[in-house]
Image (tube, rainbow, N blue to C red):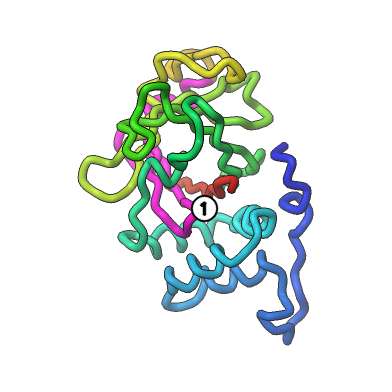
Amino acid sequence: MCGCRAAETVERRYPPGVSAAESSPSDELRRRVVETPVDARRIGEYLDALSHEQRVAAIRSLGRREQRALYTAVDGFRPVRLVDLVPPERAPQETVRHYGRNTLPAFTHFEKRFCRPAGADSAKPDVLWGFNFQRLQPLTGPGYFIARPAPDRPEIWVDYNRVPELQPETWPALRRNEVGLSRFVYGFMIDTLRGVSEHVTIGSAARKGRDMGSWFVLCREP
């Protein structure tokens, strides 16, 4: 779906006794995430050293257990800002793709696509616009949202209760999240994003203020 062929094919496991240096980025990231204690700094540095294709493959190898552990481990570790999601050098309304994996039972690979509204300060925007790109989009809707800074922590809220005023020409038609099947997928939700590395964030979903026990990890394109 994302065009990153390696991200779809690296679910390899190495036999006992294989060193970390010989293992794949996916194996090594999973190993670091389940360490006790988890070292968020080492994880961030490791992800920064990978290529984009390796990062996507590695983060998409993380299952529920690893994503939950990573979300907890990076609490307060790396502040994340709107310019980390859409860098200042990107043009207004230019799409920035974040390749992700969630902890749902099926259709786990998806993307969040963001842009900076026209007229916003490229170095310090107030909000970003975005939607979800995934295989069930024709049924569930695009899942439009507004991304904004969390009010009391250096995190980002992905707020599905609000949708953009308009959308770039190449994006799907605007649709609110309280109607049709969208209501059960995106309705009344706010995701919280925490920083992991320069390109990687991890999120947790809440509906009507209640944690859903659902996580997702994202890797921004270069």
Residue behind mark 1 = 199
| Observer able to see residue 189 | no
Is residue 174 shown in magenta? no
Q: 10 or 56, which is in the foreground?
A: 56
Magenta stretch: give its range: 182-211
Magenta stretch holds residue 205: yes
Image quarter of residue 102: top right
> Which residue is at 76% across, 59% downward?
10
Q: Position of residue 57 (x, y in %)?
A: 68, 56
Element type at mark 1: loop
Q: Residue 56: x and y, percent?
A: 64, 53
Residue 220 point in image, percent of width and height: 55, 46
> Looking at the picture, which amino acid does disc 1 mark?
His
- Is residue 105 visible in the rendered image? The answer is yes
Q: Nearer the viewer, residue 141 or 46?
A: 46
The answer to whether 143 is drawn above or below residue 78 in the figure is above
Count the marks. Answer: 1
- The quarter of the image holding the N terminus is top right
Q: Nearer the viewer, residue 210 or 22?
A: 22
Tell me which residue sits at (65%, 19%) in the image.
138
The image shows residue 208 at horizontal and vertical percentages of: 32, 31
Q: Residue at x 50, y 25 (%)?
A: 93
- Looking at the picture, does residue 63 appear above or below residue 185? below
Residue occupying image coordinates x 59% and y 37%? 111
| Mark 1 nearby-residue class (10 Å; few <14, some 14–19, many ≥20) | many
Which residue appears farthest toward the left when viewing the image? 152
The reply, left or right, for residue 104 in relation to residue 107 is left
Up/down of 29 relative to 21, above or below: above
Q: Image height check: is 118 above or below 213?
A: above
